[in-house]
Amino acid sequence: MAKKEKIIDFNSGWDLAPAPESTSHIRLKKKYDLYIGGKWVKPSSGKYFDTINPATEEKIAEVAEADAKDIDKAVKAAKKAYDEVWSKLSGKERGKYIYRIARIMQERARELAVIESIDGGKPIRESRDIDVPLAANHFFYYAGWADKLEYAFPNRKVKPYGVAGQITPWNFPLLMVAWKIAPALACGNTVVLKPAETTPLTAIKLAEICEQAGLPAGVVNIVTGAGSTGAEIVNHKNVDKVAFTGSTGVGKIIQRAIAGTGKKATLELGGKAANIIFEDAPLDQAVEGVINGIFFNQGHVCCAGSRLFIQESVYDKVMRKLKDRMESLVVGDPLDKNTDIGAINSKEQLNTINKYLKIGKEEGADIYQPSCNIPKKGYWCKPTLFYNLAQSSKITQEEIFGPVLAIQTFRTVSEVIAKANNTPYGLSAGVWTDKGSKIFNMTSQMRAGVVWANTYNKFDPASPFGGYKESGFGREGGLHGLSAYLKFD
Ligand code: NAD
């Protein structure tokens, strides 16, 4: 008699024993001031705001809210440090400081990972294995370039801008700070950086690390606050270069604000990436790539593969595999090592996602969510598929920035290229196929800054990242990332 095949019942869920990451080793204060000129200073307004844990809705700490006076102080400190110290140091000496920051980040990696997960809601597996190591790698990579700028740009004379004003979002708090600070310092600029208001803690920890590394006072200044604080940085007359990562809406405001001022800018903005599965693709691998593409970091990813295009001939098969795989996703405590999908970063972001879930239903699309439970307290969203959607649907067109995937079908290569490019954005894309020639054809015709082939969401400090169209301009990472912080004669 043939042996009875064991059938996995995905619908009964997974009964995994809890595997919580320890938090006993982290040190957090109740209140954090501004890090300006190498000192911790109180905000001139005396105002502080709460940063909360989105998985529990509990307050973690109070953080200073910087106003125009504080920003002026921070820019003055950065200018002084540039004029008197940093611009006079050799590239080799600058490199040593940057290496030291990277090494201390590695030493304090567990602490940084836990704080990142508590403050932002992302699964500890991601902050531990991706955010923090990649952030340290960015410092290592750019430390290596600090004394080799003349080799990076042969026969060109390069000079730093001076003071770089940098503003970062909440989705990869420490990593985005590393993308900004490491190349700026390597090129000889000094920095005033404002992290996002919902996730300021790892940037504050990085300020502590700069102190620990003995970085000269004023070379890195970390100022906390909301959008108005960011606007003060953008508009300050002594900020020579603005580096912004965030939404396209705010990117447009910044571009308008600096028009005609002579300030240089890089804008890393939103996205609505196409992830495309051809019938000849290794389908299981492609489904894993789709899961990673949209559910990594709760879908709070600028380059998330949030539009899935499936070739019609394999549509049913891919949908079945995708739904089965989603049943196995663990949604819950970010500090549990089993967790695949953590908490939504803030109540505001959850409201935005819920607004889109409502729109999708009203537009008449089909919706699928797995049967997982979600915790009662905190901000949570089940991983969601929308299918049978129109190309003009809001779910297909607009960036949701959550674990929500818009699925469409296609028959031919030219059809899917037209559909994939039919978006105001142009940050990233993914192609799944067995045919190398098809990959080259697709990558050359898609208007996206990064195109992954048979993989998704892979990052490396040596590889430039950035967008076209409303996804912004300028590149971070690699040599391109260096040139964003240099003037060329
Ligand atoms: P956001 O634009 O609301 O905020 C980003 C940062 O800008 C925050 O620090 C915020 O305080 C600040 N800010 C807000 N208004 C400002 C103003 N008028 N002047 C100056 N600063 C201001 O974006 P978010 O919601 O924090 O982040 C999500 C967005 O970021 C998404 O659209 C995502 O796609 C994008 N993003 C892009 C990349 C990329 O590399 N292209 C990477 C990560 C996130």
Image (cartoon, helix red, strand yellow):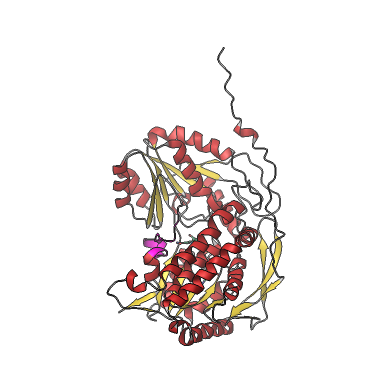
Can residue 235 be seen from the camera position used here?
yes
Q: Identify which residue, 135 or 56, lies in the foreground.
A: 135
Can residue 245 be seen from the camera position used here?
no
Name the residue located 58 percent from the left edge and 81 percent from the top edge.
Answer: 36
User: On the rendered structure, is 469 left or right of 292?
Assistant: left
Residue 179 place in picture, x, y as percent: 47, 66
Q: Quadrant of residue 198?
A: bottom right
User: On the rendered structure, is 376 left or right of 277?
Assistant: right
Residue 116 place in picture, x, y as percent: 61, 61
Which quadrant is the C terminus positioned in?
bottom left
Q: Image height check: is 72 above or below 384?
A: below
Q: Main secondary structure of the magenta part?
A: loop
Number of marks in the rendered image? 0
Q: Identify which residue, 16 or 401, lies in the foreground.
A: 16
- Residues shaded magenta: 459-478
Residue 16 place in picture, x, y as percent: 67, 40
Q: Image height check: is 417 above or below 208?
A: above
Name the residue located 46 percent from the left edge and 73 percent from the top edge.
Answer: 95
Which quadrant is the N terminus positioned in?
top right
Residue 42 place in picture, x, y as percent: 66, 81
Residue lying farthest to the top in this orientation: 1
Q: Identify which residue, 93 or 184, lies in the foreground.
A: 93
Q: Quadrant of residue 68?
A: bottom right
The magenta stretch spans residue 428: no
Name the residue located 46 percent from the left edge and 36 percent from the top edge.
Answer: 284
